[in-house]
Amino acid sequence: MARYTGPVCRLCRRNGEKLFLKGDRCFTPKCAIERRPNPPGQRSPRRRKVSDRGLQLREKQKARHSYGVLERQFRRLYREATRLPGPTGDNLITLLELRLDNVVYRAGLAESRAQARQIVCHGSITLNGHKADIPSIETKIGDRVGWTARGRGTKFFEMVKEWQGGREVPGWIAVDPAQLEASVSALPLRTDVDAKFDENAIVEYYSR
């Protein structure tokens, strides 16, 4: 399964803003963009004006990197969003938020989406009582996310017990702090998502 394996802090520096790809580290002075706010690579004395197409591409890349989605997957999600009723941009955000790895992250069961993806791939997460090891599974209203017996026996599970509850959980996810389980109680709305990108620019990018 293909995925980006390079330094994620480089992605934030390329986009010129924090994408919060490394969890709590992004809120500390150790964050790479705090220490080196300039883009990676050799510096150029010339400042090039970015075209409208370039700005749209930048927004699309922000969304991809934020959710850890490759171009092929992202294009497929966009096509699905165009077939759903309502604004395509809002539909795209809803589909991204309903990914299993994102639900695990939003519920506070992982510090970052990359970490959530890892514990899903390692077989530590269940969906409706069955082991689910595909991070891109689309969850639905009423779906329950929990831990496998193997997952509950890991040191990571004990770490989750310590920090769970410290992060604000969106209203469309209900969390059982005693069992460290969560359920999707509603569809995520645009107002529920602290997206760092402009979804309308993404729609314009693919519409050309």
Image (cartoon, helix red, strand yellow):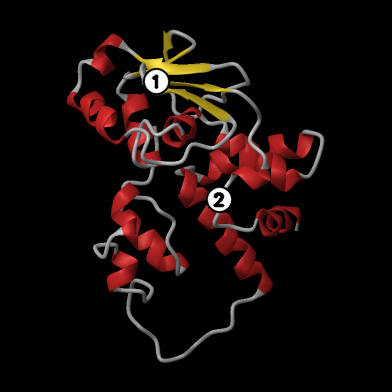
Asked if 161 appears above or below 43 in the picture, the reply is above
Q: Is residue 7 among what the camera can see?
A: no
**What is the quadrant of residue 72 in the picture?**
top right
Judge by depth and name the residue closer to the eye, 136 or 79.
136
Asked if 126 appears above or below 70 in the picture, the reply is above
Judge by depth and name the residue closer to the eye, 27 or 103.
27
Residue indicated by mark 2: 194
Residue 15 is situated, as x and y percent measured from the top left of the image, at 46, 66
Q: What's the amino acid at mark 1?
A: Asp
Q: Earlier in the sequence, mark 2 or mark 1?
A: 1
Could you tell whether 104 is left or right of 163 in the image? right
Asked if disc 2 and disc 1 are in contact, CB closer than 8 Å, the reply is: no
Asked if 27 appears above or below 64 in the picture, the reply is below
User: Residue, x 51% and y 49% (percent of image)?
Assistant: 64
Q: Secondary structure at mark 2?
A: loop
Could you tell whether 159 is left or right of 130 in the image? left
Q: Residues within 10 Å of mark 1 (few under 14, many from 20)?
A: many
**What is the quadrant of residue 116 in the picture?**
top left
User: Residue, x 60% and y 16% (percent of image)?
Assistant: 142
Pair 2/1: label in front: 2
Judge by depth and name the residue closer to the eye, 183 or 204.
183
**What is the quadrant of residue 119 in the picture?**
top left
Residue 20 is situated, as x and y percent measured from the top left of the image, at 40, 53
Considering the image in quadrants, where does the C terminus appear?
Answer: bottom right
Residue indicated by mark 1: 133
